[in-house]
Amino acid sequence: MDLLVGDLVTMPGLSNPIESAYRDAIDAMPPAERVARSAAMFQWTRQQLARQIIAERKVDGASPDIDPEALKWMVALRLYGDQPVVRRLIEQRLRDVSG
C-alpha cells in the first residue's frame, strides 16, 4: 500500500514532527490564547468560504455582488448544511433576506 504524506497525519497511532510540534505549541498556550486562536481560525474559515462563494458566482456568470447578510447565511449553509434541521432554518433565513 502506498502512503501519502497526508496519510501519516490522519492514521491513528502515527505522528509526524510537524503534528507533534503543533500539538506541543497548542498545549503550551494558556486557555485564553487557545480560544483566541480557535476564534481566529474559525473567522478565517468563514472568510475563505465567503470568497469561494463569490468566486463561484463569477464563474457561473452571476453578479458577484451579494448582500452581506445573504452571504453570511450562504457561508452558514456551507458550514452546517449537512444537518437537516439546521439546513432548513438557514434556508428559511436565506429566503427571508433574499426577498
Image (spheres, grey):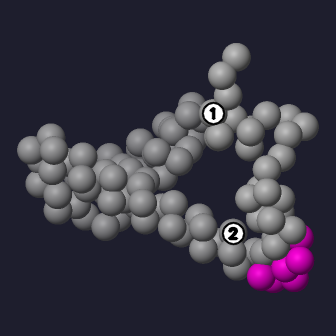
Whether residue 96 is visible here, answered yes or no, is no
Nearest to the observer: residue 21 or residue 26: 21
Callout 2: SS? helix
User: Label 1 belongs to which residue?
Assistant: 4
Give 85 or 78, whichever is nearer the viewer. 78
Q: Are marks 1 and 2 in contact (CB under 8 Å)?
A: no
Q: Say above or below: 11 vs 99.
A: above
Q: Which residue lies at the image location 41% right of the left edge and 44% below the top edge?
A: 92
How far is mark 1 from mark 2, CA to CA? 27 Å
Q: Which residues are magenta?
A: 27-33
Q: Which residue is mark 2?
A: 38
Label placed on residue 59: none
Q: Nearer the viewer, residue 26 or 42?
A: 26
Percent coordinates x, y for residue 56 in the rendering = 24, 46
Relative to 96, is 20 on the left or the right? Answer: right
Q: Main secondary structure of the magenta part?
A: helix
The quarter in which the N terminus is drawn is top right
Q: Residue 77 location in percent, x, y?
A: 46, 45
Mark 1, secondary structure of its residue? loop
